Image (cartoon, rainbow, N blue to C red):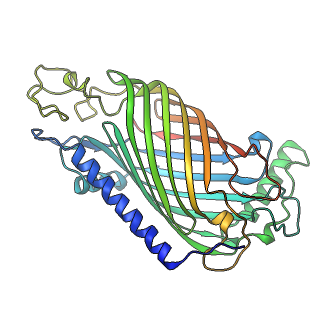
Amino acid sequence: MRCTSRKSNRKGWWLGLFALLCCLGWSSNNHFAHAGNPWSLQGRLPEHVFLLHDNDVYFGTDRMYSSGLLLEVANLGKLGDAAQAMSRFFFSDRVMALSSLSVFVGHHMYTPNNITIRRFIEGDRPFAAWLFGGVKYEVQGADWNLKVQASLGIVGPWAFGDEFQTNWHWLARQLIQSTDPPVPQGWHNQLPNEPTFQLGVRWSKEIAQIVSRNTRHLDLSLFTGGDLGNVWVRGMIGLTLRFGYIINMIPSSEDLPWLLREGSHHPLTGKPIIGNPTVGPHGMGGRGLQDWEFYVFIRPVVRFVARNMFLDGTLFQDSHSVPKVPIVVEGEFGISLKIRYFRLSVSAVFQSVEGDYERVDPSGHRFLRIMGGFEGF
């Protein structure tokens, strides 16, 4: 049976997100604003151009969340100026923070368990493609991080899932001279065209760290957030553990005395700093950042799902749907390497079952995530 949403529920979702954003903004602005600091500690996160690729073919499957592409550009040109202007508006000068503003465009594809069956399959998830673009604002504090993003898009034939998967599989067959991957047969059963609008917020707080000067060797963060729109309505909570040789873009309170000029005030305590330590070119009192980075990361997360368009079907018209599982557990394990201006991250993502299908794989779903591109400084 197709799931529908009542108007009162939709109103509650919007009010809930508005309240969450207000609370996060108030918390960050007040928790990190300390008296006695006469100068601004705000700057920019590094500019970057990243391409992210998700695909389950690396695990020998072609189903569920079958493919994802995302191109993101951050802080280039006027984007960096706009990010700093937003930070000056939302945060006090006494908040130690780096910010960025990025634009992105992405494409997701979702398919049933078997893409070679042409007939409509009642008990399996529908074919669906999502083409979207948007903006993201990020602020990195001394031990906290806030991300807020908004996107517009389209789900349905206008998202070109059929053309993308058919041509990609044809090219792969030519390159490897094989009959696999197969020709997809069921895209005429996909979800109908529907415009999408999504808001998302992520808040993380560092709860443990091992830092030596400008290098982190370990950090553990708790994060939470949510998504609201006609694609997803969901909340989440999780942990991120990183260990290795990690760039410390914002110095810890223990390292600040040797990073700040004589006569300055400690931005967290408001007490004057005594001494004349070395000051480097990167602002915020820093002496500079190492030009390489390598770390391993582990990210478990629990998602609480009230709506998933790719299972519930479209919101404004009738479409195929299957019952969803309201709690989904996900684990991501990977590595990230940065050498001067280039970064490459590779991770494996493991998800529990999202829907109550007729043929359920109890092991859930697995896919590989590859992200690479240019990162400034």
The picture places residue 202, in percent across and down from the top left corner, at 43, 50
Image label count: 0
- Could you tell whether 115 is left or right of 239 in the image? right
The picture places residue 6, in percent across and down from the top left corner, at 54, 77
Q: Nearer the viewer, residue 218 or 291?
A: 218
The picture places residue 63, in percent across and down from the top left corner, at 77, 53
Q: Nearer the viewer, residue 164 or 76?
A: 164
Identify the residue at image location x=69%, y=75%: 192
Q: Nearer the viewer, residue 67 or 287?
A: 67
Identify the residue at image location x=56%, y=35%: 344
Residue furthest to the right: 179
Q: Nearer the viewer, residue 356 or 170?
A: 356
The picture places residue 117, in percent across and down from the top left corner, at 89, 62
Identify the residue at image location x=88%, y=69%: 119
- Could you tell whether 74 is left or right of 5 in the image? left
Work out which quarter of the rendered image holds the N terminus and state it: bottom right
Work out which quarter of the rendered image holds the C terminus and state it: top left
Figure quadrant of residue 311: bottom right
Figure quadrant of residue 33: top left
**Rendered view: 185 above or below 61:** below
Identify the residue at image location x=31%, y=27%: 288
**Rendered view: 339 above or below 171:** above
- Could you tell whether 124 is left or right of 69 in the image? right
